[in-house]
Amino acid sequence: MQIAPEITYRNIEKTDAIDSLIREKITKLEKFCDYMNSCRVVVEKAHKHPDSGSPYKVSIDITIPHGREIAVSHNPDRGKQYPPLEVVIRDAFEAARRQVVGLSTEQKGIRKTHPEQEISAVITKLFPEQGYGFLKAIDTGEEVYFHRNSVVNEDFAQLEVGNGIRFKATQGEMGLQATTVQIIDRQSSASRSEFVPESAEKPMGWN
């Protein structure tokens, strides 16, 4: 994140537990969108004794390149009588996560069509001479290793950073490893360079 997260408390006492929870949630958001410009969070006690709902309100404002912004304001209403502040925070960040994933997918040019053509990851790193690379899962933001032998139709030589793919993975000695990799969208790094790194040093531990 280009600007350090900003957390503001209004009419409520700041505690280490609440502050740690918020920072943990911000870190998790960055796994889904690692190019956020800024994130501002406001936690406040809007009402001392509401007739229904929660006295707490959590607002989250996230800015993303190209003038895009995600705004969430969560204040549980009727049907949720006095949920703890931690619950309000978690619900607010879950709403923000859904927006972040949707916007990140949109900006990468990924569109879901038929299930058999659904993109589940993007190629982020390639080491052609060594015959392997890494992909980033869209739903979890997790990085997954793959070998050229796992690419269907022997398409490894056709891969480019930024390609949209489908994959299956299993847990290996060094972490998650893709067992099958299938190219779905051949859109390359030329059009996704703002979102996906074009090059990277060889990760430690992988041969």
Image (tube, rainbow, N blue to C red):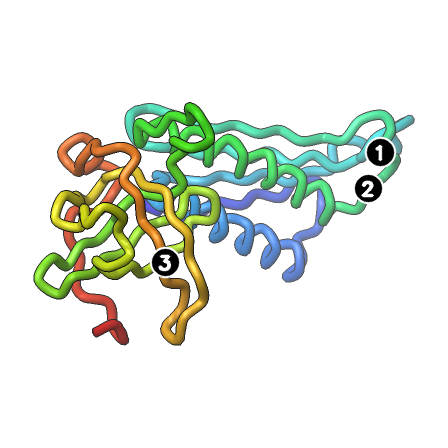
Q: Which residue is mark 1?
A: 80
* Place of residue 51 in the rendered image (x, y in percent of width and height, measured from the top left): 91, 26
What residue lies at 21% left-to-right and 31% top-to-bottom? 187
Q: Which residue is mark 2?
A: 83
**Mark found first going from the N terminus, 3 or 2:** 2
Q: Which mark is residue 104?
A: none
Q: Is residue 116 left or right of residue 22?
A: left
Foreground mark, 1 or 3, reads 3
Looking at the rendered structure, the kind of residue marked 2 is Pro
Instruction: Please report contact status of discs 1 and 2: CB closer than 8 Å, yes or no.
Output: yes
Looking at the rendered structure, the kind of residue marked 1 is Lys
* Place of residue 149 in the rendered image (x, y in percent of width and height, measured from the top left): 24, 59
Q: Which residue is mark 3?
A: 179
* Place of residue 110 in the rendered image (x, y in percent of width and height, measured from the top left): 35, 29
Q: How many marks?
A: 3
Q: Is residue 16 left or right of residue 98?
A: right
Measured in 3D between alpha carbons, the distance from the residue under mark 3 to the one under mark 2, in whole angstroms, is 44 Å
**Mark found first going from the N terminus, 1 or 3:** 1
Instruction: Please report contact status of discs 1 and 3: CB closer than 8 Å, yes or no.
Output: no
Q: In terms of secondary structure, where does tag 3 sit?
A: strand
Measured in 3D between alpha carbons, the distance from the residue under mark 1 to the one under mark 3, in whole angstroms, is 45 Å
Q: In terms of secondary structure, where does tag 2 sit?
A: loop
Q: Quadrant of residue 46?
A: top right
Foreground mark, 3 or 2, reads 3
Q: Quadrant of residue 10?
A: top right
Measured in 3D between alpha carbons, the distance from the residue under mark 1 to the one under mark 2, in whole angstroms, is 6 Å
Looking at the rendered structure, the kind of residue marked 3 is Thr
**In-front residue for pair 156/127:** 156
